[in-house]
Image (cartoon, rainbow, N blue to C red):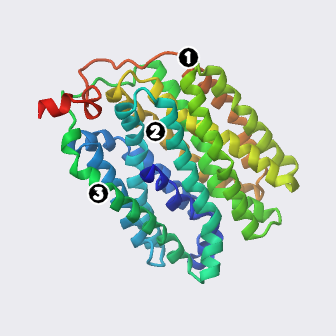
Amino acid sequence: MLVALNLRPTIVAVSPLLDELSVDLALTGSTAGLLMTLPVLCFGALGPLAPVLARRFGFERALALVLVLIVIGSAVRLHPSVWGLFAGTLFIGAGIAFGNILLPALIKRDFPDRVGLMSGLFSMSLTGGATLAAGITLPIARAAGLDWNVALAAWGLFALAALVCWVPYLRSAIAHAIVRRGAAGPLTRDRVAWWVTAFFGIQSINFYSMTAWLPTLLIASGSDAVFAGLMLSLVNLVAIPAATLAPVLAGRLANQAALVAWTGVFYVAGLGGLIWAIDLAPLWVALLGIGQGATIGLALTLIVLRSPDSNVATNLSSMAQSWGYLFAAAGPLALGLLNDVTGAWFWPLVVLLVLVVPQSVTGYFAGLPRTVTPASGPDTLGEDAGSGSAAKEQL
């Protein structure tokens, strides 16, 4: 949970400060969109390295590296320049890319009988970290008189504290050694794997697009920066119970198809409200947050539920998140460009509203009670070696 808490704040914290740092660094709308897209590109491009790290070093050491990279990236952001901002974001994006993929596989390895509960706690930690960053970054920075670069770098202390707490697990990493039996077959020929990947990617477009631009579009509609930051915090705050409860419910159901598909109703209400009645922004933002929390929780849970063991879970997590995030990376950038062209946020919101249809369809098929089958090859990481006595006996 401590690791998961650090997988969103360093990204989300940029959004409330985006106007301030854009003015200070003279960033255009397209460059600002690229800044918000860079972490998602890292998730997609570097994600395939996560299974390699897990096989080479084990989950414990690989997750320690996740926190180290976040700390380094936060420190680099202290330099108040474009290169410092982008270089720090690159380190952070790499760390989070590995953490995103490894944690669902770790749940499958260590908690195979409590997938729903642990996936819910994982999702709760993700949304909780995002809520903290969205809600307190700007107010604390202003109250303490911090520049934007210091405010962003301060989140590295949060990751450093988690790293200190993680150190004892490094000592026991040998006891949780992973049995290496060669490479597993690819999942790219499996239809279920592609449904999970498509659903993950489409719901990620909405989350990262709204994370990047919600404060900006509210400010453009006449709201002040503090209110806009609070709305970003609200969308993540209401997502916490949804992200916690949806996986628990999914874990108790044999068929998750209808549950996943119906989450689209909250998106339609939230996005439609922002388009046609933005004066009621808190209501629409709350509904959107429920939808976002439920879908991210379900997307991560489906990775675990559709996998027969931790080995396949690692590969499916890598495939779904790598391809999904590469697909999602186009969201913030495309919406920023569309806003530049049209001069308004109406059409970007309409695009997100239309995407609810394929999101619900892919979610329905991903939720059907089937498991992923690798094309060929033995297990990649061994059968739940870290959670039982098999690894110890082999050592």
Q: Amino acid at mark 3?
A: Val
Q: Point out the frontmost of discs 1 and 2.
A: 1
Identify the residue under disc 1.
Answer: 254
- According to the image, label 3 marks what residue? 167
Residue placed furthest toward the left: 395
In front of the other: 265 or 331: 265
- Residue that label 2 marks: 321
Lower sequence index among marks 2 and 3 = 3
Q: Quadrant of the C terminus?
A: top left
Earlier along the polypeptide chain: callout 3 or callout 1? 3
What is the x, y in percent for residue 188? Answer: 39, 25
Tell me: 277 left or right of 42: right
Mark 2 and mark 3: Cα distance apart in space: 27 Å
Query: Is residue 186 or residue 165 the one in the foreground?
Result: 165
State the residue at coordinates (56%, 37%): 297
Q: Residue visible at 23% across and 39% down?
A: 176
Q: Earlier in the sequence, mark 1 or mark 2?
A: 1
From this view, report whether residue 249 is shown above or below residue 78: above
**Quadrant assignment, res 227:** bottom right
Question: Hey, what amino acid is under mark 2?
Answer: Gln
Residue type for callout 1: Ala
Task: Report the Cα–Cα distance between label 1 and label 2.
Answer: 24 Å
Q: Position of residue 113 (x, y in %)?
A: 43, 26
Spatial distance from mark 3 to mark 1, Cα to Cα? Answer: 38 Å
Give the tally of numbered discs: 3
Residue density around tag 2, few if under 14, some if 14–19, many if 20 or more, within 10 Å? many
Residue 376: in sight, yes or no?
Answer: yes
